Image (cartoon, rainbow, N blue to C red):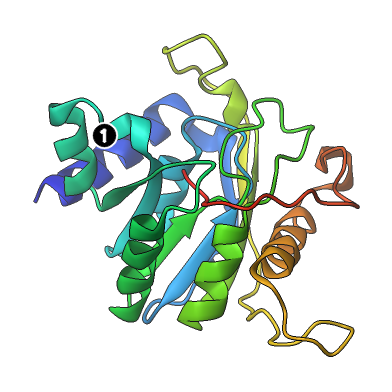
């Protein structure tokens, strides 16, 4: 019940604050059933919530940074809304197990391979190997979602939302290959880079971040 109410509440707020300035393209690519790993670029605080509530499924789960769970009440609220913690910049095995369990149950999981926000959308963050690990070991179909403009809804240093042009673009589902171009098994880091490339390809050329042609690869877990 709490999840359903919060989901509706976020959608109402989005329409009130953003109205027609929010555009969603390609949502027909999103599978309505089964295990789905949704990946995206992370430029704004409101991005995970906006993306999740407009996915036409009620079993959307989120990986979220562990700092959000430190306050007991907030931690409880996040868990009620299908979020579970991940310790960023570490190989958080508990979070990875939780992610695989969500997908094994046939649900949808939303993660951000960069692991943190880039704020201005112009610099690509370290692509975390954990996202590739989840993709390789779950076998779930992967759906890329690119977004831009959400960084202006709640700018850095502010907590007050404001109107802005926000766009979400959903790409076609895919699976990471088992082998790389050299014929060797694909590593989790390589899988994560391939996944992020699919996201960046959805961005308008002028919105593609610096360093997109040579992704830096991290070695830990992704987070919202």
Q: Position of residue 166 (x, y in %)?
A: 60, 36
Nearest the viewer among 120 and 202 is: 120
**Could you tell me which residue is drawn at 55 percent across and 69 percent down?**
133
Q: Residue furthest left?
A: 1
Image quadrant of residue 116? top right
**Could you tell me which residue is drawn at 67 percent across and 49 percent down?**
218
Q: Is residue 182 above or below residue 25?
A: below
Q: Is residue 198 above or below residue 1?
A: below
Does residue 121 appear in this view? yes
Nearest the viewer among 136 and 62 is: 136
Q: Position of residue 45 (x, y in %)?
A: 49, 30
Q: Position of residue 40 (x, y in %)?
A: 60, 53
- Within 10 angstroms of label 1, few (less than 14), some, or many (20 or more) residues? some
Q: Is residue 40 above or below residue 164?
A: below
Counting the numbered discs, the total is: 1
11 sits left or right of 178 in the view: left
**Could you tell me which residue is drawn at 58 percent across and 45 percent down?**
23
Q: Is residue 61 above or below residue 9?
A: below
Q: Secondary structure at mark 1?
A: helix
Q: Position of residue 211 (x, y in %)?
A: 87, 42
Nearest the viewer among 150 and 37 is: 37
According to the picture, the residue beneath numbered tag 1 turns out to be 69
80 sits left or right of 62 in the view: left
Q: Residue furthest bottom?
A: 183
43 sits left or right of 33 in the view: right
Does residue 29 appear in this view? no
Image quadrant of residue 183? bottom right
């Amino acid at each position: 019940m709490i999840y359903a109410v919060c989901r509706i509440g976020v959608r109402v707020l989005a329409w009130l604050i953003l109205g027609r300035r929010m555009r969603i393209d390609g949502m027909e690519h999103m599978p309505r059933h089964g295990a789905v790993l949704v990946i995206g670029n992370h430029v704004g605080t409101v991005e995970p919530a906006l993306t999740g509530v407009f996915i036409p499924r009620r079993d959307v789960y989120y990986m979220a940074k562990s700092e959000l769970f430190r306050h007991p009440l907030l931690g409880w609220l996040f868990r009620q809304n299908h979020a579970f913690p991940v310790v960023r910049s570490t190989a958080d095995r508990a979070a990875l197990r939780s992610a695989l369990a969500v997908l094994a149950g046939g649900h949808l999981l939303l993660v951000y391979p960069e692991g943190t926000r880039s704020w201005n959308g112009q610099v690509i963050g370290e692509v975390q190997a954990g996202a590739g690990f989840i993709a390789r070991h779950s076998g779930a179909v992967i759906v890329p979602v690119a977004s831009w403009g959400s960084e202006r809804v709640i700018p850095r240093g502010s907590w007050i939302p404001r109107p802005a042009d926000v766009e979400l673009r959903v790409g076609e589902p895919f699976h990471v290959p088992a082998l790389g171009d050299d014929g060797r098994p694909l590593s989790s880091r390589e899988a994560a880079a391939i996944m992020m490339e699919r996201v960046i390809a959805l961005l308008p050329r002028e919105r593609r971040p610096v360093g997109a042609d040579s992704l830096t690869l991290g070695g830990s877990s992704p987070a919202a």
